[in-house]
Each structure stands twice: as structure tokens, then as C-alpha cells.
Image (cartoon, helix red, strand yellow):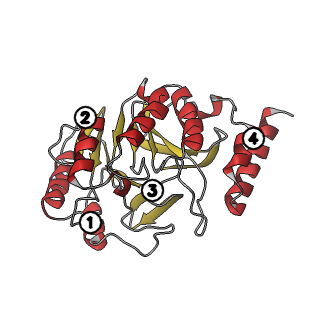
């Protein structure tokens, strides 16, 4: 069987699993050792990875991490959308996460967005700081890589869960303004744990000030996408020109009721010459399940 036929069969099998919700053990039995060549992009300037919601699903996460670490050219960083554990205030689960993440942490930095399963009580926050070596006084922060500004928000502040309000909203507005007005910045990406407009099992449970946040994000031309997790699916929602991308398929039990229920991570490729952002969802077979450009 030639490689084109193998790729076609793998994609069809992935689609069947996605529709039927068959056990992931079936995937593990047939193996996940496909070649990495199809994930190499010759004209990209650099790339980064995005994934979220492991929730102790390490048999799945290990397969995805193997594929992440093998990508050539090597991505510059990885963004984790949170919910790496089942229970907050748990150093053992943190240690397990770092152990299973070692193939990627050995070759690239991993930046974590706090999820609801990481907890917001004082002890959980203390452990989060120790485990991530977070230098910010808050659990939201930003950084620049090449020509791109990453803005990591915190939807889990105690008492204001599921919203971005007050001091953090002022900070987010200021960060967006600074990046938009900085000539050296071409791209802005914003990260939340909870989706502003959930499209999976949490559909209809919008963030408390969803319309206010959407109105803010609409103002920025350099904003290329908003990455979110929490729903255990892949979903791309285009709303008034804003790209909302949910990636919550890194190991947790999948949501199948509204589509997109397959395990995956994102490979985001940046091509400066054409100002193009290419996004691929990479599945357990190391295959490109979905692909689009921004």
C-alpha cells in the first residue's frame, strides 16, 4: 500500500472514531508510529504548539507529546490551556505532568494557562507558583517571541471565575493596546482557559462578560486568534472576524455531543513574508486532521 493510500485510510479511520466515539484503547492497539514528514512546513519562519485538558489522560498525552517533540523544524514553544490534573492542591499530579511532558520540556518552554482544575485556593496557588516558577504577581502574564505577543489570561480568579473583570480587564486592554501600537509586533494571540463562547458540552455557558470581552477583542487588527480549552474538543468559531479556537483534546475524556471530539494538539506556523498563520490539528496517528490559514 503506497503512502497516499495509507494516509487516506488513517484519516478515514480517525473520522470513524470521531463520529462513533469508539474506545481510545483501539487506537493504542493499532499504533501511532506514522512518519513526521507531512508535518514539516518548508516556508514557515517558526512555529508553536497549543494543547489543553489532559486530566490524567497520560496514555493519550504520551502519544501526542511524542509527536510534538519530533516536529521539524522544532517549534519555539508550547502553550498549555490548563486542566492538567483532576484535583487541585496536588503536587503528585503536577510531578506526573512534568514527567510525561519531559520530551517537549527538554526541547522547548511550556507556558501554562491556569484551568479550573488547578484550583484557586491559597494552597493550590502556592503549588502552581512553585511548579511553574511563575514570576508574575498574578496568574495572568504576557511575553513576546520574535514578532508575536502572547497574552495569557486567568479565568479562575476566586470570586470572579468565568470572567475577565476589574484589574485584569484593565491589564488586558493595556496589553492589547501596547502590542497593537508596537511596530515590531505583527501578531497577537490571547489565551483563556474557559472559552468566551463555548461550543462543546459547555455550550451556552458563556463567560460572564462575554459580550464585553468580544467587543474589546474586535478592536485589534493584529489579533490573529484566541486560544481556549475547557471543552474537550477541537472547535473553530469565527465571530465578527475574531477567531476563537478551542483545543481541549490532550488526554481528558472527550465530548462527542457537538462535534470535534478527537484527541489532538495544534501546530501553528508563522510565515512572515505573507503574514500567514497556518494551523493544523494533529491527531493520535500524527496525521493532519484539520488545516486552515488565518
Q: CA distance from mark 2 to mark 4?
A: 38 Å
Residue at the disc numbered 2: 133
Mark 1 = which residue?
A: 163
Distance from the alpha carbon under mark 3 to that under mark 4: 30 Å
Percent position of residue 133, x then y:
25, 34
Q: Earlier in the sequence, mark 1 or mark 3?
A: 1
Check disc 3 and report its element: helix, strand or loop: strand
Residue farthest to the right, as pictured: 1
Query: Of discs 1 and 3, which sits in the foreground?
Result: 1
Q: Quadrant of residue 214?
A: bottom left
Q: Earlier in the sequence, mark 4 or mark 1?
A: 4
Q: Earlier in the sequence, mark 1 or mark 2?
A: 2
Numbered disc in front, either 1 or 2:
2
Instruction: Say whether disc 3 or disc 4 marks the residue closer to the N-terminus.
Output: 4
Counting residues from the start of the chain, the first of labels 2 and 3 encountered is: 2
Left or right, 53 with respect to 135, comes to: right
In x, y percent, where is residue 136? 17, 41
Please tell me how crowded label 3 is: few (under 14), some (14-19), or many (20+) other residues with Cα within 10 Å: many
Residue beneath disc 3: 245
Crowdedness near tag 4: few (<14), some (14–19) or many (≥20) residues, C-alpha within 10 Å: few
Residue matched to label 4: 29
Residue 44 visible in the snapshot: no
Q: Dot 1: what SS?
A: loop
Q: Nearer the viewer, residue 85 or 169?
A: 85
The CA distance from mark 1 to mark 3 is 18 Å
Q: Count residues near mark 2 (Cα–Cα under 10 Å), then give few for <14, some for 14-19, many for 20+.
A: few
Asked if the residue under mark 3 is in contact with the one under mark 2, i.e. CB atoms within 8 Å, the reply is no
Which residue appears at 56% of the width and 56% of the height? 253
Amino acid at each position: 500500500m503506497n503512502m497516499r493510500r495509507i494516509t487516506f485510510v488513517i484519516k478515514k479511520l480517525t473520522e470513524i472514531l470521531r463520529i462513533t466515539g469508539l474506545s481510545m484503547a483501539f487506537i493504542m492497539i493499532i499504533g501511532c508510529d506514522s512518519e513526521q514528514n507531512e508535518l514539516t512546513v518548508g516556508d514557515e519562519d517558526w512555529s508553536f504548539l497549543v494543547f489543553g485538558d489532559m486530566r490524567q489522560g497520560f496514555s493519550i498525552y504520551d502519544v501526542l507529546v511524542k509527536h510534538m517533540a519530533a516536529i521539524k523544524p522544532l517549534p519555539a514553544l508550547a502553550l498549555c490551556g490548563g486542566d492538567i490534573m483532576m484535583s487541585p492542591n496536588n503536587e503528585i499530579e503536577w510531578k506526573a505532568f512534568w514527567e510525561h511532558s519531559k520530551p517537549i520540556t527538554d526541547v522547548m518552554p511550556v507556558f501554562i494557562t491556569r484551568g479550573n482544575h488547578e484550583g484557586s485556593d491559597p494552597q493550590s496557588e502556592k503549588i502552581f507558583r512553585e511548579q511553574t516558577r511563575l514570576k508574575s504577581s498574578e496568574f495572568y502574564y504576557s511575553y513576546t517571541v520574535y514578532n508575536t505577543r502572547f497574552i495569557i489570561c486567568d479565568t479562575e480568579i476566586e470570586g470572579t471565575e468565568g470572567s475577565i473583570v476589574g484589574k485584569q480587564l484593565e491589564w488586558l486592554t493595556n496589553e492589547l493596546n501596547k502590542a497593537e501600537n508596537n511596530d515590531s509586533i505583527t501578531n497577537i494571540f490571547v489565551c483563556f482557559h474557559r472559552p468566551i463562547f463555548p461550543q462543546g458540552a459547555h455550550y451556552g455557558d458563556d463567560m460572564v462578560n462575554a459580550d464585553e470581552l468580544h467587543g474589546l477583542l474586535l478592536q485589534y487588527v493584529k489579533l490573529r486568534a484566541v486560544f481556549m480549552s475547557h471543552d474537550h474538543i477541537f472547535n473553530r468559531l469565527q465571530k465578527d472576524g475574531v477567531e476563537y479556537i478551542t483545543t481541549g483534546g490532550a488526554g481528558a475524556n472527550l465530548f462527542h455531543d457537538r462535534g470535534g471530539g478527537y484527541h489532538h494538539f495544534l501546530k501553528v506556523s508563522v510565515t512572515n513574508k505573507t503574514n500567514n498563520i497556518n494551523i493544523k490539528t494533529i491527531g493520535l496517528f500524527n496525521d493532519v486532521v484539520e488545516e486552515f490559514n488565518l
